Amino acid sequence: MRTAVVVGAGVAGLATAGALARSGWQVTLLERGERLRGLGGAQLLWPNGLAALASMGLDLGDLGSPAPFGGIRRPDGRVLVAPGPAHAVGMAGAMTTDDLGGRPDRPIVYQAGLADGHPIQRAPIEPPERSAPPPALAPPVEPVVVHAADLHALLLSGLGDRIEIRTGIQVTTLSADSADWPSVGTGRHSFQADLVVVADGAESVLRRRLAPTAKAEPAGYTTWRAVVPWFRAPKLPDGVPAAGEMLGAGMRFAHATLSERWTAGEQTRGGVYWFATTPGAPRPEPIGVQLTLLRRWFADWRSPAAELLEATQADDLVPQPALYVHQVPQRLGQRVGGGGIVLVGDAAHAITPSLSHGACLALEDAAVVGALMRSAVPGADIGIRLDEYTRLRRDRVVRLGRIARRLDRLMQAQGRLTVAARDAVLGRFATAVLDRAVAAATDWQPMAPAESAAPPAGQGQQPPGAVTQWDGAPTG
């Protein structure tokens, strides 16, 4: 019986646990919380994320709501990028400091923090002169927005009956001695398996043990998310799209409408998801005070910012620092004895939210692990497949992480001149810039399950270094 221990029950952990269980593995899922639950807010899933779900036998069905691109505006309502069929909430293109009028050797520096209760450099910016109307985006690539609780429930439904779930387990140690089997521990209990899946988030304790130089770094701003449920959601004024985004000086506000859902004749889901950013680290005040501050900071922004914030309650709000993993580990899969360790999701390669692709990359990871390990045999075979996982995943996640950081420089720009340059770039070159980022992020297809690289159990193991034939070679 092949065994796996999965540490963490977020999107990456749940999806990977389910993929392994459906591949015939006996899985133990460890979660530090007292119960399994989603983080709140909503997730944006692009075609690659949906393809990953489908490859694992999971169908989003009517849980997802289309999130057509509703354009990008300034806080005063001036249109920077016209609505179109490509793009979506929270997305932008791969920009450099040259694109923002700066010098390559002088990167843009965030001015983190707040002054007098307001984000700094928040003064209105005069719009750049424009000789032509803002462009609309063309490629027909659209994501869907799904309530985080619904995605969580879908992943839970896919766990099957080959999984033991243990909550309230705070994993603090990891054994990666190459002469032994991999294991994790709490100080009092140890869990050993053929495969350990590290899915404990961006600030992963276990990643520090495997790759000390791969650290979670702050990007200089805080994100705020909430879903205003249907019974409290305001009616959007005429002219406000179902999904859209506004950019200010170091601040952003985006929204997307969740479709109504009915159960037994009664409405049970729906509402409006919104996402905002402000400069600086997470606020120390109680969550109710933070909501009051947000209402003050976005009070003079065009609709629907003020209406959605007014309809939001403290329990809806999810503040998070924008983090990214600096120096993604050289090996995302590592051999240990006759088994190994694999890192997935934010624990492996957290990227900043500007690309709106964290959940999609986690689902890709899970789909690849499931396909590679479907017929894996403990011993050299697992090691070979872990090497293949690194080959398939690392270059892609590093590239998208770089794009996300460049987007930060664009979307979180501060300072009068820098913001004016940003707005001019978006107004004149949005189609080429934004479409390029969308294409890079969505350019992924699931792989076919790999055939065994070793004889079946009981017939010996393949010697180290043997050549493996893989059925399918996806774009990693």
Image (spheres, rainbow, N blue to C red):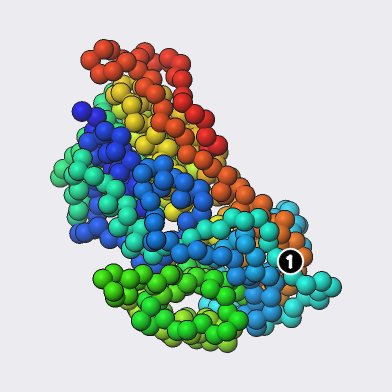
Q: Quadrant of residue 231?
A: bottom left
The kind of secondary structure element at disc 1 is loop
Q: Within 10 angstroms of label 1, few (less than 14), some, or many (20 or more) residues?
A: some
**Residue in the image at 18% along x and 49% along y:** 166
Q: Nearer the viewer, residue 300 or 65?
A: 65
Q: Residue furthest front?
A: 265
**Residue in the image at 44% along x and 70% along y:** 258
- Up/down of 242 relative to 5, above or below: below
Residue 113: horizontal and vertical position, in percent?
Answer: 53, 73
Q: Quadrant of residue 427?
A: bottom right
Residue 5: horizontal and vertical position, in percent?
Answer: 26, 40
Residue 158: horizontal and vertical position, in percent?
Answer: 29, 48
Residue 100: horizontal and vertical position, in percent?
Answer: 73, 62
- Up/down of 335 relative to 166, above or below: above
- Regarding residue 164, the answer to whether it shows in the image is yes
Q: Residue furthest left?
A: 188
Q: Amino acid at mark 1?
A: Pro
Q: Quadrant of the N terminus?
A: top left
- Up/down of 261 relative to 62, above or below: below
**Residue in the image at 57% along x and 71% along y:** 244
- Regarding residue 100, the answer to whether it shows in the image is no
Q: Is residue 115 left or right of residue 378?
A: right
**Residue in the image at 35% along x and 17% along y:** 454
Counting the numbered discs, the total is 1
Q: Nearer the viewer, residue 324 or 76?
A: 76
Q: Is residue 425 left or right of residue 112?
A: right
Q: Which residue is mark 1?
A: 135
